Amino acid sequence: MNLWFNTEKGEVICRECGLVIEDKLVDFDQEWREFDAEAAARKRRTGAPMSYTQFDQGLGTDVGRKGDLYSLGVKDKNKFFRLRKWQQRISTAIERNLKLALAELKRVSSYLKLPRSVEEEASRVYTLAVQKGLVRGRSMESVVAGALYAACRRHDVPRTLDELSEASGIEKKEIGRTYRFITRELGIKILPSNPADYIARFASALNLTAETQSKSVEIIESAQEIELTSGRGPTGIAAAALYVAALINNEKRTQREVADVAGVTEVTIRNRYKELLSELDLEKEIKKTKKKAEKIAA
DNA sequence: AAGACGAAAGTGGTTGA
DNA sequence: TCAACAACTTTCGTCTT
């Protein structure tokens, strides 16, 4: 998509269709001007942005820099070195662990192409987990994976456990276990993920058109209304809806193909598919497109 | 011959006593 | 803590296109 950030009007506009995507941009410009370093020091109110992806939220203090040394006498110099030693000692287990873990977190999150907001949230979750001592007895990596999984769910950009497992090299059930553990211990509430959130990703992996996508979201919505979706795995439902929608729009994919990208088996798709057909009378629509296809062939 | 279908047995996780 | 249970998987044989 070709976007145009109009900072004057505070809008984000699509260059192709002119659609205004966002009309409440924050103005990131300063409201004053500075002409030299002196004025800058006087006028700037903030430092670097605070971020949980930095192990100390970007707010850490170092004792002294080399430049300060020249103004000190011998006695003060010794004091200076002593203080700096202490500073380094204080940064003990927790901080070192955080540094390592957040590096790992960044790696996994960029592998999965997760948005910044999710990475940020996951870092926050991990930091909390460390502070509560929840990492003890668990591998750092698995907690990182669990935190990321939780963050994904919260931000409605679900990745499957399989994907997380592939990216982090941690076993699926291990991730699931720590995920459940830390969300329980930290009191993080997570709604069951919505099957519709998976559609966009699965559809593009299968090269399906936008119509098929919206059709399958439609199907999911009507299925949810009659409680067909509760208690079932969301990926299975998403896969089945996508499969049916593809049939209706004459873009048939095999059950095998859909099953692979969704990370479920053909059997699960069949089961959901059967339920969808019997409860939502979609058979008519499928027959319609079949007839159309035959006419075109003839 | 490939894909769809369905039965049966197995797995990991939740729930309720 | 254990057993019952539901969802999902694996496997395999049969039917359909």
Image (spheres, coloured by chain):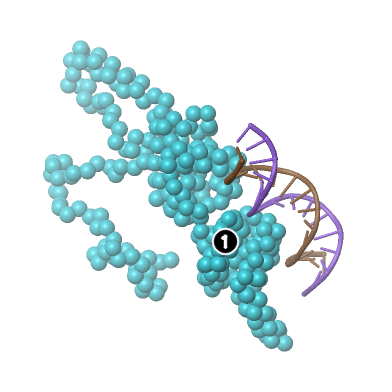
Chain colours: A cyan, B brown, C purple
Q: Pick whichever, A43 or A11, lies toward us.
A: A11
Callout 1 amino acid = Thr
Task: Provide the secondary structure element on which disc 1 rests.
Answer: loop
Q: Chain of mark 1?
A: A
Question: Taking the image as drawn, is residue A251 in sight?
Answer: no
Image side of residue A94 versus residue A232, left or right: left
User: Where is residue A116 shown, x and y percent of the image?
Assistant: 40, 50
Quadrant in the picture for the C terminus of chain A: bottom right
Write the residue at 28% across / 63% down. Answer: A24
Identify the residue at horizontal 44%, vertical 51% (top origin): A154
In the picture of the structure, the residue carrying the numbered disc 1 is A229
Residue positioned most to the top:
A75
Q: Quadrant of residue A247?
A: bottom right
Q: How many marks?
A: 1
Quadrant of the image containing the N terminus of chain A: bottom left
The residue depicted at 62 percent of the width and 78 percent of the height is: A285
Residue A78 spot, x, y in % from top left: 25, 14
The relative height of residue A85 versus residue A152 in the rendered view (above or below) is: above
Whether residue A113 is situated above or below residue A238 in the rendered picture: above
Residue B15 vertical position relative to residue A252 in the rendered view, above or below: above
Q: Can residue A62 be seen by looking at this rendering?
A: yes
At a point 55% along the width and 63% down the height, the residue shown is A227
Across and down, in percent, residue A14 comes to 38, 69
Q: Residues within 10 Å of mark 1 (few under 14, many from 20)?
A: many
Q: Position of residue A11 (x, y in %)?
A: 30, 66
Near-viewer residue (A58 or A130): A130
